[in-house]
Image (cartoon, rainbow, N blue to C red):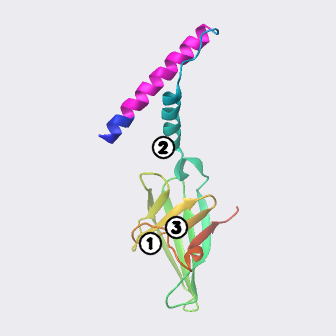
Amino acid sequence: MLKQSLTKNLAKGLAVMAAILLVAGCDKAAKQTDNSEPSQNVTQLADATHNARTSLDWAGTYQGMLPCADCEAINTKVTLNTDGSYQLERVYVGKSAQVFTEQGIFNWSDIGSTVLLEAEQPVQFFVAENQLFMLDKQGKRIEGDLAARYRLQKLTE
């Protein structure tokens, strides 16, 4: 219902904007009417399409040391590819030198701000400018004293 209402308002707003531009283009002396509603709708459209997936250079490799319950840290490297594939590498520092590697596909959230790595144990990240923030199992940002440690930094190529 809300989606239909927004779509109708957007269509009306765009129609009004098109009419205003047509009149203004044909007759420079014509005065523009109050178009605050159409410009609000256009702004809403721009905001709806502005997200990490469409606005950031997210593809690449990210690395960081994530907290670990039974080791010093988890040296984690995630590579996100533009084709929707990923590679995840983990080394449990202080426990083993073995590199645990997983590959697969990732999916974007509906709003385009988080990715879900389809792994043996799925992992979610919030995508920010040149960094990934690991999310909890409910898909929320981790809070508290260790929150800053759940961040992977994008590596320069």
Residue 97's place in the image compared with 86, above or below, is below
Q: Which residue is mark 2?
A: 48
Tell me the distance, in whole angstroms, between the alpha carbons under discs 2 and 3: 29 Å
Secondary structure mainly formed by the magenta segment: helix
Q: Residue at x 58, y 48 (%)?
A: 55
User: What residue is shown at x 60% (from left), y 10% (from top)?
Assistant: 30
Which residue corresponds to the image point at 61% horizontal and 74% vertical from the top-left? 64
Q: Quadrant of the N terminus?
A: top left
User: Which of disc 3 and disc 1 is earlier in sequence?
Assistant: 3
Write the residue at 64% across / 8% down.
29
Among the two numbered marks 1 and 2 on one chain, the one whose residue lies closer to the N terminus = 2
Q: Nearer the viewer, mark 1 or mark 3?
A: 1
Q: Secondary structure at mark 1?
A: loop
> Residue 64: within the magenta?
no
Tag 1: Cα neighbours inside 10 Å, few (<14), some, or many (≥20)? Answer: some
Question: For the magenta stretch, what is the residue range?
Answer: 7-27
Q: Amino acid at mark 2?
A: Ala
Q: Amino acid at mark 1?
A: Asp
User: Is residue 121 shown above or below 157?
Assistant: below
Asked if residue 136 lies left or right of residue 26, the reply is left
Residue 144, image x, y percentages: 53, 77
In three-dimensional space, the C-alpha distance between marks 1 and 3, rounded to whole angstroms, equals: 20 Å
The single residue placed furthest to the left in the displayed view is 1
Res 136 label: 1
In which quadrant will I find the C terminus?
bottom right
Contact, CB < 8 Å: mark 2 with mark 3?
A: no
